[in-house]
Image (spheres, helix red, strand yellow):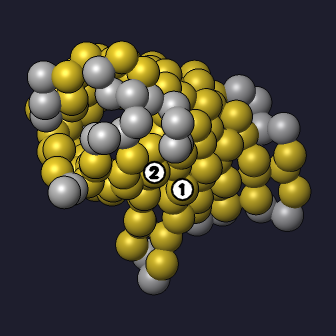
Amino acid sequence: MSKRAEGTFVLDTWDAEKPYDEREGTALTRVHVGKTFSGDLSGTSTAELITVSTEAGPAAYVGVERFTGTLNGRTGGFVLQHNAGGENGRPWLTWKIVETSGTGDLKGIKGEGQITIEEGGGHSFSLDYELG
C-alpha cells in the first residue's frame, strides 16, 4: 500500500558554475544544491543538477539528490532522480526514488513525487512511496 509524504524544503545553497556549454541563447550549467526538508520528510540533502537556461529564463533541469533524515519516523536515506521542464509557460518538476538506494530504516523504499514552486518562491513536495 502506497503512503504519501508532504512538506516543504528550503534551498540552503545554490552554487552554480559558469555555463559549460553556451550557444545560440541556450546555456547548460552544473549546479550544486543543499536543502533542508520539513514535514513528513525531515532532514537534509545535496544534489547535483544540470540546468538549461534560454533567453526566456530557466527552461529545464535533470539531477540526482541524496537525502538523509527521517520519513514518517523512519531514519535513513535514499537517492532521488529529478526531471523538470515546462509546458505552455507552466513548470513541472518530478522526482523518483532510485530503486535499491534506500538505507537504514528506509531500505527497500520505492516511490515518486512532485515539487511545487509556490507564488512567493517557496517549495513544497509530495512523495508517494512504499516500504517493504
Q: Could you tell me which secondary element the residue under label 1 belongs to?
A: strand
Q: Which amino acid lies under the numbered mark 2 shown in the image of this protein?
A: Lys
Residue visible at 21% across and 29% down in the picture: 71
Q: Which of 26 and 30 is in front in this view?
A: 30
Q: Mark 2 points at which residue?
A: 96
Could you tell which of marks 2 and 1 lies nearer the N-terminus? 1
Judged by depth in the image, the label closer to the viewer, 2 or 1, is: 2
111 vs 132, nearest the viewer:
132
Vertical side of 98 occupied by 17: above or below: above
Question: Which residue corresponds to the image point at 33% horizontal and 55% vertical from the top-left?
Answer: 113
Amino acid carrying label 1: it is: Asn
Q: Residue furthest front?
A: 132
Instruction: Give the image location of residue 32, x and y in percent.
Output: 59, 25
Mark number for residue 83? 1
Q: Which residue does the image show at 42% across and 58% down from the upper left? A: 93
Image quarter in which the C terminus is found: top left
- Residue 77 in view: yes
> Which corner quadrant of the image does residue 54 belong to?
bottom right
- Horizontal arrangement in the rendering, residue 42 relative to residue 20 (left or right): left
Where is residue 95? Give x, y as percent: 44, 51
Residue 15 appears left or right of 42: right
Q: Neighbour class for label 2 at 10 Å: few (<14), some, many (≥20)?
A: some
Question: How far from the left and from the top, in percent, is residue 20?
Answer: 84, 38
| Mark 2 vs 1: CB contact within 8 A | yes
Q: Is residue 93 above or below residue 80?
A: below
Q: In which quarter of the image is the N terminus?
A: bottom left
- Using the numbered discs, state the Cα–Cα distance from disc 2 to disc 1 in whole angstroms: 9 Å
Decide: few, some or many residues near mark 1? Use Cα within 10 Å; few <14, some 14-19, many ≥20: some
Instruction: Judge from the rendering whether residue 102 lies leftward or rightward of residue 118; answer left or right.
Output: right
